[in-house]
Amino acid sequence: MNWFSKLQRIDPRIVYVLMFVALSIPLIMPLGIPLSISPLTRPIFDIIEGLDPATDVVLLSLDYSPAAAADIHPQAVVVVDHLTKRGIRWVGVSFWPEGPMMIEQITKALEARGGRYGTDFANLGFKTGGENAIAAFANNPLVITKDFIGNDTANLPIMQGITHIRDFGYVIGFAAGDPGFAAWIRQVVDPMGVKMASGVVTVSVPHAVPFVHSGQLQGLLQGLRGAAEYELLMEAPGRATAMMDAQSMGHLVVIAFILIGNAAYLVTKFVKKD
């Protein structure tokens, strides 16, 4: 009887230690917990697979801050990995002040692996103005005259022939808030007929899904899980997959303690009645 009473009063430090262990193990040694591929994720992968490395340049808009990076930055990383693997050039831009530093993290990693800035990829930096800035950029990407590191945008090899957003082979927007995919749909997708997909933080998924069903978005990456699914499509489980494993293990620990606590309470209550 005393044992069941103790189970209802577990020292919180024990809970914290077990949670720490449960979260740490998958990050060190990914467990490969099975993960189904959402039909919202696969179209993005398929469209990129169908692009022509010789002619297509992809536009990536990274509109989030470090506060949301844990949930959404792995999406941008794995999509860039896919583009790099296929030899497809890409241009990054942001309509959030913190966005360029998120792009720079990716470009610096690529340069360290031999990527050519300005030829294989570029960081156009931040354009102020929110939704109006998106509209202005769509009509003339060279409205951003200097890239993030001060180069003349018009002189970048990757920007040659890019005079309108329709000159990009595909557009993907990663956003944690406003301006996000809704602004792009209003200013670019609907009026200009541009094909676009989006990556959003988990809490924004219910708001974004209807735009996929309507055909206004060609695909949707759903928070950290979307990045993990994409890694599996790439057959290269990485950081996002490990983080999903850790998240699953954390949930299992919480569920286990809930079950143990309630079971101990019910047993104690039953014995007292007897």
Image (cartoon, rainbow, N blue to C red):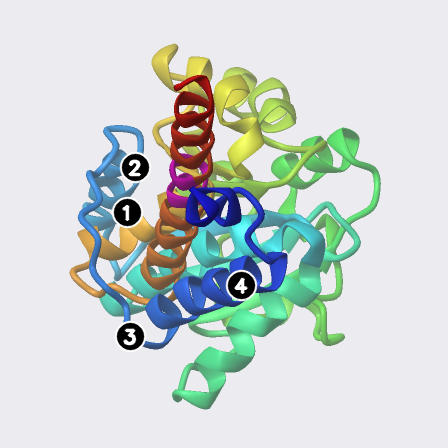
Mark 1 or mark 4, which has the lower sequence index? 4
Q: Residues within 10 Å of mark 2 (few under 14, many from 20)?
A: many
Q: CA distance from mark 4 to mark 3?
A: 23 Å
Give the residue drawn at x 42%, y 72%: 120
Badge 3 density bin: few <14, some 14–19, many ≥20, Cα 10 Å: few
Mark 2–mark 3 Cα distance, whole angstroms, equals 25 Å
Quadrant including the N terminus: top left
Instruction: Name the front one of labels 1 and 2.
Output: 1
The tag earlier along the polypeptide, 2 or 3, is 3
Between 207 and 96, the residue placed more toward the observer is 207
Query: Percent x, y for residue 21?
Result: 43, 69
**Who is closer to the viewer here, 21 or 226?**
21
Mark toward the start of the polypeptide (3 vs 1):
3
In this picture, is 85 found above or below 108? above
Q: Callout 4: few (<14), some (14-19), or many (20+) C-alpha neighbours within 10 Å?
A: few
Task: Identify which amino acid the numbered label 1 is placed on.
Answer: Glu
Percent from the top left, x then y, of residue 65? 71, 53
Instruction: Say the numbered circle drawn on residue 229.
Output: 1
| The stretch drawn in magenta includes residue 257 | yes
**The label number, if any, that marks residue 41 in the structure image:** 2
Residue that mark 4 sits on: 14
- At horizontal 43% and vertical 19% (from top left) the residue drawn is 209
